[in-house]
Image (tube, grey):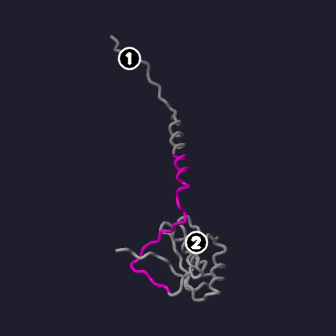
Amino acid sequence: MATGSSLRKPRRLMNQINVVPYIDVMLVLLVIFMVTAPLINPGQVELPQVGQGLSTVEDPIEISVTAEANLLIRDRAEGETEERGISRAELARIVKAKQVKRPSQPVVIAGDKAVRYEEVLKVMDMLQQARVKRVGLLAQPRSN
C-alpha cells in the first residue's frame, strides 16, 4: 500500500534571491538620509574638556577644525564674532599677515573632538612651517 507522501512530487530547490524587498528598504533609507542631511549643523565644534582653563592676556586668532576637517578662522582682537571658512593653502598667509600687525598675538587651534588627531597635527605643522609663534590648543574646562 502506498502512502500519501510517496505520491507527492519532489520539491525543486530555489536558487534565486528575491531582491525587490531589499531595494524597497534601500530607497526608504535613501529618502530618510536625504531629508535629515540638511538638518545637520556642520559649523559647530565640540571641544574636548580639560581640568583647568587657561587665561590669555591678548585675544587670540582662533582656527577651528570641524568634524569634516574644514578650517574656520576668527580673530577676536579685530572684533570678529563670526568664523569664516578658509582653505589650507591660505591659512599660513592669513595668520602671518595678522601677526605682522600684532607679533605677540597667540594662535589657538580648536579641534572638534570627533575630528581625527592627524587633521589637527596637519594644521599645527602648516603653522610651524610658516614660522608662526605662540601656537596652542583650545579646550573647554571640565565642569564638576
Q: Residue at x 51, y 72 (%)?
A: 111
Q: Residue at x 65, y 78 (%)?
A: 94
In this picture, is 16 found above or below 57?
above
Q: Could you say which disc has been placed on residue 6 in the image?
A: 1
Secondary structure type for disc 2 = loop
Question: Residue 75 in magenta?
Answer: no
Residue type at mark 1: give it. Answer: Ser
Q: Residue at x 45, y 72 (%)?
A: 48
Estimate the x, y position of residue 65 in percent, counting from the top left: 55, 70
Circle 1 packing at 10 Å, graded few (<14), some (14-19), many (20+), is: few
Estimate the x, y position of residue 27 in percent, counting from the top left: 54, 43
Residue underneath mark 2: 83
Q: Earlier in the sequence, mark 2 or mark 1?
A: 1
Residue type at mark 2: give it. Answer: Glu
Secondary structure type for disc 1 = helix
Separation of marks 2 and 1 at Cα, in angstroms = 80 Å
Segment colored magenta: 29-56
